[in-house]
Amino acid sequence: MSQSILVIGGGFGGITAALEAAEVGHEVYLVEKNPYLGGRVMQLNKYFPKLCPPSCGLEIQFQRIKRNPKITCLTLAEVMSVSGQPGNYEVAVRIKPRCTDQSSVDLSKLAAELSRDIPNAFEFELSTRKALYMDVPFAFPQRYTLDRDNLDESDRRKLTKHEAIDLDAKEKTITLNCGSIIVATGWKPYDVANLTNLGAGRLANCITNMQMERLAAPSGPTAGSITRPSDNRPPRKVAFVQCAGSRDENHLPYCSYICCMASLKQAQYVREQYPESEVTIFYIDLRTPGRYENFSKKILADEKVKAVKGKVAAVQEDLASQGIWVTAEDAVAGNKLVECFDLVVLATGMQPSLSGLPLPMDVGMDENGFLTGGEERGIFSVGCAKEPLDVMKSAQSGTSAAMQAIQTVRGR
């Protein structure tokens, strides 16, 4: 039996699982499709339970990975196929070329000289990037990535002369042998283009909750200043629309667990940055489980934060001010509410990253895209690949999966 363990997904849950297994002596392969580890946490301004920035927890984890020779990190990598049985799996992994030198060379000046500006997916297209880029300042690995598909001929000529660039690097496929597999593929925001009545992607000042995280983040497109995308003005009236796509039979029929807490946290961002601002949260039910109840009470005790129980029916842009008119019901007062806001934030639901994609291994998937089963074959799901969870619970599920994977490869 192989004593190695494969972890698919380098977010917080996957990193936790990899470290737990490696630190008791098992060889671990950590496979991540992005150029960096850290998953969605890397895109947050702050995360629960301590409301600390991503660097607070992730840099410690990165140091643990650096110090542990048992962990092999493969970024820009995807699992293509899995064959075999518990104790003896063969896994084909495709690795895309990064096209840059392995040393931690600062290529920011070279990147700035490139001609094309490309929509930045890491920033949810709130800004642009160059074809040579590093998504965040504390990225791990600390290496630039070259997007060759977005180079023109003049850019290619510049890069050909640079010793840290390899324009001819090739994609490769490797085969790994492992005894157990942990799937920690995480989540993606629900596509708001499906929410035609709520305006995100169509109205400049109607954004998603993840875009709000990037606006508030010091490393984000506005260096932490929460401003309206249309004109960079500070918003004085902000609305949060809960369950944008969640708990809806036409979209995501389940509760995404974290959305209420995310909006309360973001209401705090706004109030701290703009003391005169007003916040309204439109909700169906405010769900703040366990230890988060006190945080909810603290935010809602603010006289400038108003919670309205009622579903938002539509949003419309005010042509003069580019504000957003929100039409909603007030279920408590029993009337219709129509009000204009400077900025509207949609609390979009979390959808498993593998939803709608073919699986390279023999595990089940329910109608919502969450993984089911696999334990009897030594395959264990972690975090939001299995169900909607916050960061803390994702890390706990990573520890649990690591223990189960260790038992599998040791034949217990």
Image: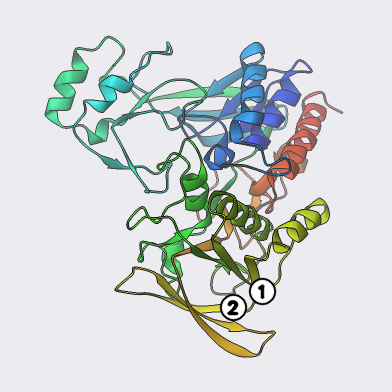
Q: Residue furthest right?
A: 412
Check disc 1 and report the residue beneath it: 284
Residue 336: image location, x then y, percent: 56, 88
The one nearer the camera, 156 or 113, is: 113
Q: Amino acid at mark 1?
A: Ile
Tell me: residue 245, above or below residue 333.
above
Locate the C terminus and report the quarter of the image it occupies: top right
Q: Are marks 2 and 1 in contact (CB under 8 Å)?
A: yes
Q: Give the quarter of the image for residue 333.
A: bottom right
Tell whether 92 sits left or right of 145: right
Tell whether 337 sits left or right of 100: right
Residue 340: image location, x then y, percent: 45, 75
Q: Residue furthest front?
A: 276
Q: Amino acid at mark 2?
A: Lys
Tell whether 17 sits left or right of 195: right
Q: Give the quarter of the image for residue 282.
A: bottom right
Disc 1 crowd, CA 10 A, few/some/many (<14, 14-19, 20+): some
Disc 2 crowd, CA 10 A, few/some/many (<14, 14-19, 20+): some
Check disc 2 and report the residue beneath it: 311
